[in-house]
Image: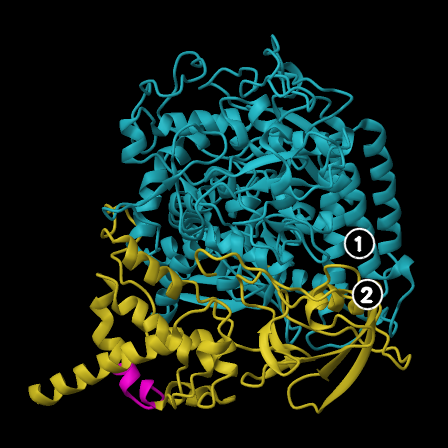
């Protein structure tokens, strides 16, 4: 989605775009986004909400890890993005009068989430896909679908093109470019099963990382609280189910085997509602996930004694549910065989999103208070208006640019906006914001900077040929080592990939400890060693899928190491990163970006300061109180708790 | 999904730990002959075709013990919103991710056949090249001709009823089921002939969607001109297979009828204008 937004923005300015994708762009992973897209809107505004509060929620939701200025600009831009999508014909749900309907979402007390059924990502990407198809038919965009990004091409330290491979013919070639935008999404496959599409290996980002791009906050991996367990993947059950009134509960009696409808209200433990009276079921994802994990894994209170809790919508009108949530209810019904309008769903957390990604930079905008403000009081007047350019300077060439000049990172692969935890319905926003807002930066870079004086088209062929040679050699090595039907687990790429996923899920998700992370790094070293001897079962030089997979396993191992190292070195708990051996947030030492660098095969991490000059950090409690399955009435609030 | 009645899937009790045979039509590449290979897979609970193909990829040994190359197939979201993993399963076109083994093969020794779609050129094994499908969206200019991505206010208001109609049309994921089932849509490898071959139900339905949009209808004339020519809406033979196989329950035959009427009106108007 970030890529399509950028392509539309750049093509309409008259700059030709080559668009590369491992799948037809319409089938990108953005189609899986369900719940909606956040933006301040007129109704919420008249109730006291503002773009500024959206900004404040995003910073607080992210546990104060994000640089604050880019987040401010994104929140300020959000209403413009909704308007644009509306003009493209995205069928947003409507109110009786024909206005765009709104729903509640995690981390906010205001309705500020715009949605299209429960397939908002699909509808948004289709709107953008249609616009890009229009530019394609006018010759302004050239699509390379089923082409895989292999490596960025650098010349004098600047990115001047890419090497890519046609996944069908296996041809490897170079493409010259005055700027390169990575819009390659997250890395869910590093964890084996996740809510991600099968293409979300993170390999493209890992290749940039290996080529010298920095990676930020790798350890910040969002585990979504509600997904349907499955044999091939864990299917997302959108936060919108809770935004529309869905309630999370387990029976108060462990292993209560009665059907959910036979369990009376007084014997149900609505633990999120009891612990978080203000936010209830719509606490942010990291918190909901940890609570569900705690109830199931530590307390053994999961439904039927298994690792699962009820997500219950059965108290809502079935017609209403169909209208608002039809898409996701259909998914549940199709894959589980029960109708969630009449039977509570059984769900469990699953790896979902990577807040971390390629490190990027920006130019600060015009809003720079003398000292940071205290946390915004919900519903109170905003200290500033939402004019463009207060957070980030519009058109500054370094907005969302990596440390390599000319190489940009947009969307999920950009680490910038979500800190240590992303709020629901902010992902689609950050994708499109990057494409539109930072797309202008790309245009200015091409026009006013190095490419203007020294365009990629005029550079000597040697830099380009060298990368093609390097990638061809990598391919040859993998194919030459192929042994028909290598079922030997030690060197079979699918076995290595599975072990990687199992290990990362066990060590680097909801609860992390030093001891387990060290064990994980040792396991990764073992897998890397085995990978160096990997043998494919297919030596074909045509559409060799197992070759493509095996190549990305090598990249996933590199990314996995950055995740585990970041998690090990960050000796605190913040957002999605929870260390049971360091349970508090430590702002003095760790309100900093985890910066990973990869040189000569080795990854190192360090912590670099962030710019938090707009909002003062506060404890992120979401008003937590104590609750236990034994008492039906919530216990009094704790004096202070940190998450 | 119907609105008010509960859906009870009387799912048959599947035999736990059973072995299912996957009979897969294989082809090494364009112009190469096809052949069948059987794979035996022990299926865990809640398996689908994809998880079984993943098992085969990790251990590509046929039922008669021959070691072969892993099967190649196309997949993406695995939750039936991207359209990638469409194939012909037991003779019927559908997404393979939502094909649950407990339903399709509940008994020990059951056989599931997997074939590539036949209306698109095979790339390898179960993977086909559906670029013609996207080309046909360009033929009917399936987009709203907005003034660009700069901030120019909001779009037109829309009633909830109109949104409900358009949302369904807009859920088309370009999977190609309607084309596989259509007797009028045939394999065409020569790109030069794409513009005069039957455009297909999905594209006609998208033309309807954008013809009904207040700004999209600016291109209605051009869309209808494209659909009045060779390979346009009149090539539809009214077999009505498309609507039966559509995984998103899009009213494709209704769209064809609507667009058919629109072309008739345009033809009459053009006749009187001379």
Hey, which quadrant is residue A49 in on the image?
top left
Residue A80: image tag: none
Does the magenta portion include A466? no
Colouring style: by chain
Q: Chain of mark 1?
A: A
Nearer to me, B63 or A343: A343
Q: Residue at x 74, y 43 (%)?
A: A560
| Residue found 39% across the figure and 75% down from its top | B252
Q: On screen, B262 above or below A502?
A: below
Is residue A256 visible in the rendered image? The answer is yes
Task: Kindly identify the residue that appears in the image at 84 percent across and 58 percent down.
Answer: A495
Q: Residue A442 at what x, y percent from top left? A: 43, 47
Q: Nearer the viewer, residue A13 or B51?
A: B51
Which structural element holds mark 2? helix
Image quadrant for the C terminus of chain A? top right
Q: Magenta stretch?
A: B225-234
Magenta: main secondary structure equals: helix
The residue where tag 1 is placed is: A498
Q: Which chain is cyan?
A: A
Which residue in the structure is indicated by mark 2? B58
Residue B231 covered by magenta stretch: yes
In the picture, which chain is yellow?
B
Residue contact between numbered discs 2 and 1, judged by CB atoms under 8 Å = yes
């Amino acid at each position: 989605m970030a890529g399509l937004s950028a392509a539309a923005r750049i093509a309409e300015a008259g700059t030709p775009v080559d668009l590369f994708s491992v799948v037809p762009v319409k089938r990108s992973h953005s189609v899986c986004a369900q719940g909606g897209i956040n933006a301040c809107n007129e109704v919420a505004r008249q109730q006291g909400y503002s773009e500024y509060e959206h900004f404040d929620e995003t910073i607080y939701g992210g546990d104060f890890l994000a640089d604050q200025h880019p987040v401010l600009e994104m929140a300020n831009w959000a209403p413009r993005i909704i308007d644009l999508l509306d003009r493209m014909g995205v069928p947003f749900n409507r109110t009786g009068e024909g206005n765009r309907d709104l729903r509640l979402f995690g981390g906010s007390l205001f309705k500020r989430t715009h949605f299209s059924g429960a397939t908002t990502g699909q509808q948004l990407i289709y709107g953008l896909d249609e616009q890009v198809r229009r530019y394609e038919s006018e010759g302004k965009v050239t699509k390379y679908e089923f082409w895989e990004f292999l490596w960025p091409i650098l010349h004098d330290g600047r990115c001047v093109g890419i090497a890519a491979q046609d996944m069908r013919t296996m041809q490897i070639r170079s493409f010259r470019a005055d700027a390169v935008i990575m819009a390659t999404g997250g890395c869910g496959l590093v964890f084996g099963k996740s809510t991600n599409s099968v293409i979300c290996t993170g390999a493209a980002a890992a290749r940039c990382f290996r080529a010298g791009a920095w990676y930020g906050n790798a350890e910040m991996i969002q585990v979504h609280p509600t997904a349907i367990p499955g044999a091939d993947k864990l299917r997302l059950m959108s936060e919108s189910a809770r935004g529309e009134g869905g309630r999370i509960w387990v029976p108060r009696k462990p292993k209560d085997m009665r059907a959910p409808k036979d369990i009376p209200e007084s014997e149900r433990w609505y633990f999120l509602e009891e612990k978080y009276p203000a936010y209830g079921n719509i606490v942010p994802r990291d918190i909901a996930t940890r609570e569900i994990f705690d109830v199931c894994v530590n307390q053994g209170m999961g439904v039927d004694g298994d690792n699962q809790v009820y997500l219950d919508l059965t108290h809502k009108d079935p017609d209403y549910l169909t209208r608002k949530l039809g898409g996701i209810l259909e998914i549940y019904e199709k894959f589980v065989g029960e109708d969630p309008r009449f039977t509570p769903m059984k769900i469990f957390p699953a790896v979902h999103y990577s807040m971390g990604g390629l490190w990027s930079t920006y130019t600060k905008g015009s809003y720079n208070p003398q000292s940071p403000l205290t946390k915004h009081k919900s519903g109170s007047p905003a200290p500033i208006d939402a004019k463009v350019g207060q957070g980030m300077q519009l058109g500054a060439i370094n907005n969302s640019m990596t440390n390599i000049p000319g190489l940009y990172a947009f969307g999920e692969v950009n680490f910038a906006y979500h800190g240590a935890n992303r709020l629901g319905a902010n992902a689609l926003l950050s994708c499109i914001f990057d494409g539109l807002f930072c797309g202008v930066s790309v245009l200015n870079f091409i026009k006013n900077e190095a490419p203007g004086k020294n365009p990629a088209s005029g550079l000597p062929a040697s830099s380009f040929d060298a990368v093609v040679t390097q990638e061809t050699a990598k391919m040859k090595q993998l194919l030459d080592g192929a042994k028909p039907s290598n079922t030997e687990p030690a060197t079979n790429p699918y076995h290595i990939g599975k072990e990687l996923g199992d290990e990362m899920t066990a060590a680097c998700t909801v609860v992390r400890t030093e001891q387990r992370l060290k064990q994980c790094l040792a396991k990764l070293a073992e897998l890397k060693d085995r990978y160096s001897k990997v043998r494919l079962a297919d030596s074909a030089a045509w559409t060799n899928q197992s070759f493509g997979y095996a190549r990305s396993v090598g990249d996933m191992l590199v990314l996995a190491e950055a995740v585990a190292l970041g998690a090990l070195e960050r000796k605190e708990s913040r957002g999605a990163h929870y260390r049971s051996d360091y349970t508090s947030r430590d702002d003095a030492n760790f309100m900093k970006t985890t910066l990973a660098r990869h040189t000569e095969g080795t990854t190192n991490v360090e912590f670099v300061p962030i710019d938090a000059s707009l909002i003062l950090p506060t404890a992120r409690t979401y008003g937590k109180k104590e609750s236990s399955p034994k008492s039906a009435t919530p216990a009094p609030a704790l004096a202070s708790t940190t998450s | 999904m119907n609105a008010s009645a509960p859906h009870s899937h009387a799912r048959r009790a599947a035999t736990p730990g059973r072995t299912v045979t996957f009979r897969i039509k294989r082809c090494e590449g364009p112009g190469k002959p096809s052949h069948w290979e059987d794979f035996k897979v022990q299926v865990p609970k809640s398996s689908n075709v994809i998880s079984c193909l993943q098992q085969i990829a990790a251990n590509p040994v046929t039922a008669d013990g021959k070691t072969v190359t892993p099967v190649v197939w196309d997949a993406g979201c695995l939750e039936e919103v991207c359209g990638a993993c469409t194939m012909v399963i037991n003779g019927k076109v559908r997404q393979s991710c939502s094909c649950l083994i407990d339903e399709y093969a509940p008994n020990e020794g059951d056989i599931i056949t997997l074939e590539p779609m036949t209306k698109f050129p095979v790339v390898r094994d179960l993977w086909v090249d559906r670029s013609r499908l996207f080309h046909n969206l360009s033929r009917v200019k399936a987009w709203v001709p907005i003034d660009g991505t700069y901030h120019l206010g909001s779009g037109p208001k829309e009633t909830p009823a109109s949104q409900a109609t358009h949302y369904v049309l807009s859920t088309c994921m370009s999977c190609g089921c309607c084309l596989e089932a259509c007797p009028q849509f045939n394999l065409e490898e020569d790109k030069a002939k794409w513009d005069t071959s039957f455009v297909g139900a999905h594209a006609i339905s998208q033309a309807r969607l954008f013809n009904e949009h207040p700004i999209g209808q600016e291109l209605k004339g051009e869309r209808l001109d494209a659909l009045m020519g060779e390979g346009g809406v009149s090539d539809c033979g009214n077999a009505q297979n498309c609507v039966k196989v559509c995984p998103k329950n899009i009213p494709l035959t209704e769209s064809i009828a609507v667009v058919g009427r629109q072309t008739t009106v345009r033809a009459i108007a053009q006749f009187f204008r001379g």
